[in-house]
Image (cartoon, rainbow, N blue to C red):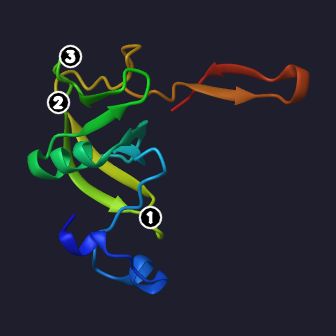
Amino acid sequence: MSAEAELPLSKVEQEEGAIFAPRFSADGLVTAVVTDVADNHVLMVAHMNREALQLTLDTGIAHYWSRSRKALWKKGETSGNMQQVQEIRVDCDQDALWLRVSVQGDGVTCHTNRRSCFYRAVTGSGATTALVPAQD
């Protein structure tokens, strides 16, 4: 992110240009989809404010904004399962990010002690909708 990114970009510049200008929501956040760089397995979805994104860019370690705690969060700081960012991609209109990471420690990402926060699948429909363990 640079001073250039603060200027409004045209639709073509936003979608096709080389200037990284993430579009933060009204509450100052951008959604981050996080996958394992080795196999693209979805690990989690989180949010970043400007400070979290800048720290991630500066350190190579994923930082997020906790909406529930209203605090900056260095992923894995207490567990040792830090996320080393290998690549960041941005979607077409720059309002969502995709972080491809290597997870340090024992590879756990979810606070439930699982590799992924997406460990359940939705089955059925209507009154028979239920959650079952996801099969990877």
Amino acid at the residue labelled 2 = Gln
Residue in front for this viewpoint, 15 or 104: 15
Of labels 2 and 1, earlier in sequence is: 1
Please tell me how crowded label 2 is: few (under 14), some (14-19), or many (20+) other residues with Cα within 10 Å.
some
Of labels 3 and 1, earlier in sequence is: 3
Q: Residue at x 44, y 83 (%)?
A: 10
Amino acid at the residue labelled 1 = Asp
Please tell me how crowded label 1 is: few (under 14), some (14-19), or many (20+) other residues with Cα within 10 Å.
few
Of labels 2 and 3, earlier in sequence is: 3
Amino acid at the residue labelled 3 = Ser
The local secondary structure at tag 2 comes to loop
The quarter of the displayed image where residue 131 is located: top right
> Could you tell me residue 5's position as x and y percent?
27, 71
The residue sitting at the left extreme is 59
> Could you tell me residue 12's position as x and y percent?
45, 86
- Residue under label 3: 79
Task: Say which of marks 2 and 3 sits in front.
Answer: 3
| Alpha carbon separation for disc pair 2 and 3 | 10 Å
- Residue under label 1: 91
